Image (cartoon, rainbow, N blue to C red):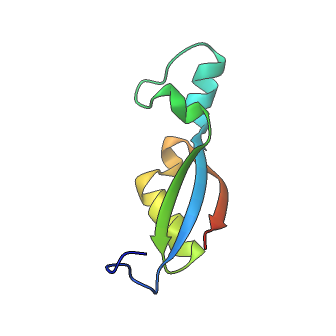
Amino acid sequence: MSAFTDHRQTVFEVELHNQAVRECVKENRSHEIFDDRWADVQTHEVAASDEHKALAMIENTYPSSDGFVVDHVKRLG
């Protein structure tokens, strides 16, 4: 753990995909904005004080309005 780590934060592993990309890939097309890899589950780690805040951070970066879907959230450590 880094000396700069905020010990009040917890790391969460968040798995998500993009449903719009998944639908495009099924139709042998590419999404106009997002890479085809988003058809598959992608894993990101987020440091937050709780799961709710971790999900809010993910929503801010990967909004559900753009087709992103959270598949799983796991607290690490």
Name the quadrant of the N terminus: bottom left
The structure residue drawn at horizontal position 59% and vertical position 48%, both measured from the top left corner, is 16
Percent x, y for residue 61?
41, 54
Return the x and y of residue 62 as percentages of the image width and height: 46, 50
Does residue 12 lie above or below 66 as drawn? below
Question: Picture coordinates of residue 23 (x, y %)?
Answer: 63, 26
Q: In front here: 3 or 30?
A: 3
Name the residue rendered at 59%, 42% in the picture. 17
Q: Which of these two is toward me, 62 or 4?
A: 4
Residue positioned 65% across, 65% down in the render: 74
Going 45% across and 64% down the picture, which residue do you hit? 57
The residue most toward the top is: 28
Quadrant of the rendered image containing residue 12: bottom right
Q: Is residue 17 above or below residue 51?
A: above
Q: Nearer the viewer, residue 44 or 28?
A: 44
Name of the residue lying farthest toward the bottom: 8
Rendering coords of residue 7 (x, y %): 44, 85
